[in-house]
Amino acid sequence: MQDSHQSWPGLDGRTALVTGASSGLGVHFARLLAAQGVRVTAAARRVDKVEALCAEIVAGGGHAGALELDVTDARAVENVVAAQAFDIVINNAGVAASAAAFDHDAATIDRVIDTNLKGAFHVARAAASAMAAAGTPGVIVNVASILGLRVSGHVSAYAASKAGLVQLTRAMAVEWARHGIRVNALCPGYIETELNRDFFETDAGKALIRRVPQRRLGQPEDLDGPLLLLVSDLGRFMTGTELVVDGGHVASPI
Ligand code: NAI
């Protein structure tokens, strides 16, 4: 049986771009890929954070470089990809907004859609254009969410952005299969990170956990196998799909 500590085929020596790698899942994905021998570019707006992460990876014998990148800046994204080719892209950068739909002002809607949907589009499009021009195959993982498949209260812009990202994944997969580029969406359920840990200590947070059939939050490590499946050669016939990793949450009875 494969586990994340073994070598997954087709990863050693590959190059990967991980966006939003300054915290949470992005940090975890960068470490995970580096441990598989992938040469990771960890990108984020807070370059000091990704520099610290890359120093840690390099000190551990891995290969990693830090990059300042705001995914909403299409020109900056183009420049990054023009300067370096990637075999793997993890579109992880994302922002959330929690408010009633009535209270989503224009700036909030723009911020969420610009980052989660348009930002991922810019990055995937730029990277895939370079792959196609070079005639090299590649893999793109769009980090969506179970909220791209189902809705919940007070997350209208976020849910719409992630639903758009799921549909974008399918559209890109169909267009780019002929270039040997696979595009899939990873749809995590609730994963404990430093940003949501306090919420899950509250009564509302505990009630939410009780609605998950496995009765627990996910941990970043729960995404290891699914992510490595999508990016490695073991997932070579997978494209245009969404992989749900949620302890049974979206399958739970309504
Ligand atoms: P997080 O807030 O720790 O990570 C998001 C990262 O994206 C941050 O480092 C942030 O600085 C970065 N980012 C935001 N806007 C950016 C921009 N314009 N350019 C570049 N980087 C930008 O949160 P977390 O939990 O690690 O989320 C990572 C991804 O996973 C997000 O796309 C999120 O929507 C998704 N997700 C998270 C779940 C969870 O329960 N933690 C569940 C389902 C999906």
Image: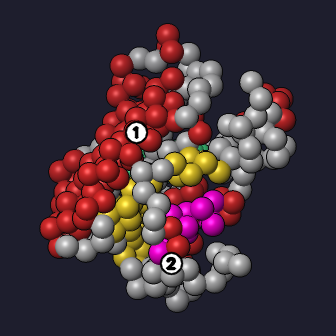
Q: Quadrant of residue 226?
A: bottom right
Q: Is residue 127 above or below residue 216?
A: below
Label 1 packing within 10 angstroms: few (<14), some (14-19), many (20+): some
**Which picture quadrant has residue 132?**
bottom left
Q: Residue 37 at x, y = what percent?
A: 49, 84
80 vs 131, nearest the viewer: 131
Residue, x 80% and y 33% (percent of image)? 211
Q: Residues within 10 Å of mark 2 (few under 14, many from 20)?
A: many
State which quadrant residue 29 falls in.
bottom right
Report the front residue among 135 and 7: 135
Instruction: Return the residue nearer the eye: 56 or 213.
Output: 213
The N terminus: image quadrant: bottom right
**What residue occupies the far bottom of the structure in this picture?**
61
Q: Residue at x 27, y 57 (%)?
A: 176
Q: Is residue 25 above or below residue 100?
A: below
Q: Main secondary structure of the magenta part?
A: helix
Foreground tag (1 vs 2): 1
Q: In the image, is 107 to the left or to the right of 146? A: left
The residue that disc 2 covers is 34
- Quadrant where the image shows the C terminus: top right
* Residue 163 visible in the picture: yes
Residue at 59 percent of width and 26 percent of height: 151
- Whether 69 is among the magenta residues is no
Where are the magenta residues, as a range? 223-233
**Residue depicted at x 55% and y 34%:** 149
Q: Find residue 172 and report its horizontal and vertical position in percent.
A: 31, 49
Mark 1 to mark 2: distance in Å? 29 Å
Tag shown at residue 167: 1
Kind of residue at badge 1: Gln
